[in-house]
Amino acid sequence: MTTLRLLLRWSWRDLRSHWAKVLAIALVIAIGTGGYAGLTSSAEWRRVSYDLNYGEFAMYDLRVDLATGSFVSDGDIAALVFTIPSAESITGVEERLIVPTQVDASTGDEIVLARGEITGSDFSDGGPSVNSHFAHTGRLLTADDAGELRVMLERSFARFYELPATGTIQVSGGRTVEFVGQATTPEYFAVAPEGEMFMTEATFGAMFTTLETAQELSGMPGAVNNLVLTLADGTDRDTIQAELETALTELPVGATVLTRDDNLSYTSLTTDVDQDQAMFNVLALLLFAGAVGAAFNLIHRLAEQQRREIGIGMALGIRPRVLAFRPLLVSAQIAILGVALGIGVGTLIGNGMASIFDDFIPLPVWITDFQYGVFARVAVIGLVVPFVASAIPVWRAVRVRPIEAIRPDLTGRGSMTGRRRTIGNSFSVIPLRNLRRTPRRTALTIAGIAAALIVLVGFLGIMDSVFQAVDTAEVEAVGSESDRISVGLDGFRPIASEVAAVEAADSVAVAEPRLLLAGSIVAEEDIDIFIELADLENGMWHPTLSTGDGGRLDGIILSEKAAADLGVSVGESVTIRHPQRVGATSFAFVDTPLPLTATHPHPVRSLAYMDLSRADQFNLAGITNGMNLLPAAGFSTEDVQVELFELEQVTSVQSVTAVTDAVRDAFNELLGIIQMMVFVVLLLALLIAFNTSSINLEARAREHATMFAFGVRVRTALRMAVTESLLIGVLATLVGVAGGFAMVWWMTQILLTETLPDFALPAIIGTGTLVAVVIMGVVVVTMAPLLTVRRMRKMDLPGTLRLVE
């Protein structure tokens, strides 16, 4: 008992004398274990939260969309749905009317004009039973609101513009409606309008209302153009989809049956959980491996410093196993402290990510409990590593004669080093010699810092790649006319009258008609596309062509990504399934083979272009549903929006850069995660570098004391330490950048192609990222020895040079 008490007191003395290094090593372990738990917990949070919310609010399983511009009477679609052979498997059906509009949510301080969409559903009997709503603020609509000019604003749009819980807005034609709350529904957990990028809440104001109110606002009483339904658990969705497609051929208009997997909002959240988790797992594993490897190296070296004291103890007759117990106690203290701090680090990182998820994806309910199971798995490693790191040098020390343990460590000073000739004076070659003497230690130090830098490059590189894609999209959208404005209409209208009406506005200089139609490319796996027909020869805008002939106007221009995914080249034929007008307001889907005349570099795969002269292929010659226009001199986009808002047929007026600006703003919200990771990597790199410098100082104390005794200045020794750290930092940075780029390439070209198949992301590392990595990997690591200058100046030379007291 006395011996144990003595050892405990001795270990506490060691802890106090090395408290800075012990705390720093414990923090390294904490960052590794806590960082891993915090990063990898997000997948479980998202999976549980998505399942809960999509189930609680009855996300549809199948959705029926009528062809663009088509409508039928209320009840017609539902009647056909219940004629299918498997109708008993349907648990919920909701017919809806979805119409485009403009939204004026301007306040006294800010003008807010955006395109929007009105979704009307049946609120009787507590409905809607499919795609129900959740009110974040205000209240939900009820059956009593049917036919009244009341709506619920989509939560993300309202929050972006900091709108009140209730109030009034205007829609197309200057009609005023009351919004009674800010709500969401499964289709809008992430805002992703058709044909665009997701996260565009700044430019898209959706509204939810009763079916009767939507019919009143659109001027189409008794009309619907959409149906959603849910299926019983275990139902074969593909079978129901095929049966519906057959039944809906009885409609006088074309109809498409889609699954929830065709909804970009749904897939952008759910299908990327596993892919995102694979990315987070790799990054977290790198962070954990780097931290644990660095901790192993540092603890190993800390234990080696006690080799001389172990030798002296053995010479005095103390049993080796008693001497071995002392450094293991210090390791136990480091391990316990590291794991305890890891819970705090994991909680901080987890809370930070949970807060960002809550802001980024406004689900009604988020489940973000700390994942103790995940933490426990890595905590075991965090507990074991310090013991293994200490046991190896201690085992070596107690197995040799006391005099060998007392003798100063001469590792790496063998004959080869002695025979090697190095150019330069003694002080300039010492840093390189020190690194060369201990290659294993040097490699572990570099690996620890490099692993942290790979994580940093991975996070920053993904953002660089996304912003590069957004920049490319913006350049393609702008073309040669940076002031170009895109206008959408509420349906298909004669070109002559609509262009004249828009050009009559004082703020408009010139307007050109265009057509925008939804379709798909028929292939083994169909690719949804949005075909824009415009004057590609003499118009104000045309897409940039990466391959092909821009003078050929008889075919279709696809994105590079679409052509690559289809495996087709310019000159080959592709089959397009598209709407074709069969009546004044009726459309049917037909398949038309078209030559691929060119490709464009826009990163959105679904964008396709044809010349407006080919409108007769759609039976839409002389018809438009949108325009490109330029503002008159002295007028801004905002002026055009305000003036055209009064035209009832105009449903959207926005700059061609509005969507890319919105996506860029939305991704800026992710900067919180980036800033958190930058801080973690900075702290980890600094801790590793500080511990390395501090342990180097103690391990080479006799060398430094000898130099100081012969008149070498402290600044010379400090310069050598800084140079050694510089070499480590440069090598770690090179490894970190190379590994980080490989990580970015894997994420953008392999992992995210499954998550976001409709977007082409380049693999790049921006200049800002390289600067940040150099600061973390070179500057911070190089400056770490400056923290030891005080100990150099206060070194006790006689005591340090004395071998045995």
Image (tube, helix red, strand yellow):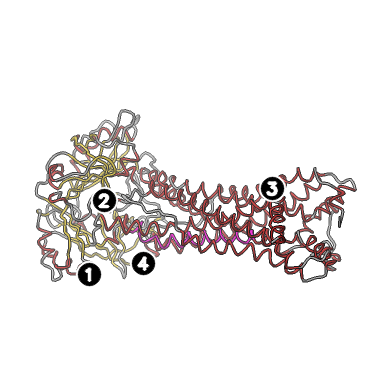
- Circle 3: residue type: Ala
Against 240, residue 157 (above or below) is: above
Q: Secondary structure at mark 1?
A: loop
State which tag comes first along the sequence, 1 or 2.
2
Cα distance, mark 1 to mark 2? 23 Å
Q: Secondary structure at mark 2?
A: loop
Against 645, residue 400 (above or below) is: below
Q: Which residue is mark 4?
A: 566
Q: Secondary structure at mark 4?
A: helix
Residue 650 on image: x %, y % = 22, 41
In this picture, residue 597 sits left or right of residue 407: left
Residue at 15 percent across and 42 percent down: it is: 217
Q: Which residue is mark 2?
A: 185
Mark 1 and mark 4 in contact (Cβ < 8 Å)?
Answer: no
Q: Which residue is mark 1?
A: 235
Which residues, given as a range, are shown in magenta? Answer: 267-295
Q: Quadrant of residue 177?
A: top left
* Dominant secondary-structure state across the stretch colored magenta: helix
Mark 1 and mark 3 in contact (Cβ < 8 Å)?
Answer: no
Residue at 42 percent across and 48 percent down: it is: 356
